[in-house]
Image: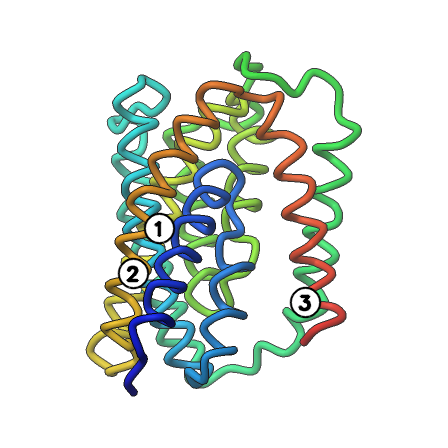
Amino acid sequence: MTFDLTVLFALAGVGVVAGFVDAIAGGGGLITVPVLLSVGIPPVAAFGTNKLQSVVGTAIAATTYWRKGFVALKALSFAIPATFVGAVLGAWAVKSMDTSLLNYAVPVALIGIALYFTFAPKLSDADRHARLQFAVFAPVMGFLIGFYDGIFGPGTGSFLAMGFVTLFGLGLTRASGNTKFLNLTSNLGALAVFIPSGDIIWPVAIVMALGQVAGGYLGAMTGIRFGAKLIRPLVVVVSIILALRLLVFR
């Protein structure tokens, strides 16, 4: 497929906006996937191209949170490989399984997340008491959500953020930083399947990735600057919009 320079510049701008939103609350695919489909890219190629361009912004955001002290990589040393394995298995499984049920189950879960982040008390940047031991159960969560990201994907960031907050007691900014690392890992796992399959439109992925560099960094810095005051409502908005899109605009 070929695209003129005007379309490519516009797609780079889309990458900036999507990277910004995704770095704070996840859900950048809400912006990028419909745009990729609208310019005539087939669905499977749109999904693969989206994974490749988004992985750049996610990497920038994850690195920024880590450099600012909101992520302890040692604590994620088992969760990261578990997430990668889950995503690879999910990407392989999607070729042979029916995922239609997820079109209804995922929106319900996302609405539940939105309600929790809206009404739960004491959601702030302060860490709270963990319900589960991080070292043992973070890899389990990473594997399961990584598998989901490989077979379907929408809402992965919201599900990870919810897990880090409710199960492991992380403050919202730390939860966002840890979410970025596992989301980056699950994207890489899916790409390990999509790239060899040829499901990437490379010129589009490259220009959008350049936009993601700026958007991912600016979004992470904004999330760090405003913390829970911004992350909490944005997670609610993204979760609701994504749920409505899955229910109404399938």
Q: In percent of the image, x 49 and y 78: which residue is there?
A: 37
Helix, strand, or loop for circle 3? Answer: helix
In the image: residue 6, left or right of residue 196: right
**Viewer-nearest residue: 24 or 93:** 24
Tell me whether the residue at label 2 lies in contact with that at label 1, contact meaning CB atoms closer than 8 angstroms: yes
Name the mark on residue 189.
2
- Quarter of the image containing the C terminus? bottom right
- The amino acid beneath tag 1 is Thr
- In the rendered image, residue 182, in percent from the top left (x then y), is placed at 37, 44
- In the rendered image, residue 34, in percent from the top left (x then y), is placed at 54, 70
Q: In percent of the image, x 33 and y 47: which residue is there?
A: 57
Q: Residues within 10 Å of mark 3 (few under 14, many from 20)?
A: some
Q: Which residue is mark 3?
A: 246
- In the rendered image, residue 53, in percent from the top left (x then y), is placed at 32, 60
Q: Which residue is mark 1?
A: 83
Which of the marked residues, 3 or 2, is nearer the chain's N terminus?
2
Q: Residues within 10 Å of mark 1 (few under 14, many from 20)?
A: many
In the image: residue 117, left or right of residue 211: right
Count of numbered badges drawn on the protein = 3
Q: Which residue ends up furthest to the front in the rendered image?
A: 6
Question: Label 3, label 2: how many angstroms apart (C-alpha)?
Answer: 24 Å
**Nearer the viewer's eye, disc 3 or disc 2?**
3
- The amino acid beneath tag 3 is Leu
- Quarter of the image containing the N terminus? bottom left
| 126 vs 21: above or below | above
Which of the marked residues, 1 or 3, is nearer the chain's N terminus?
1
Q: In percent of the image, x 24 and y 82: which residue is there?
A: 198
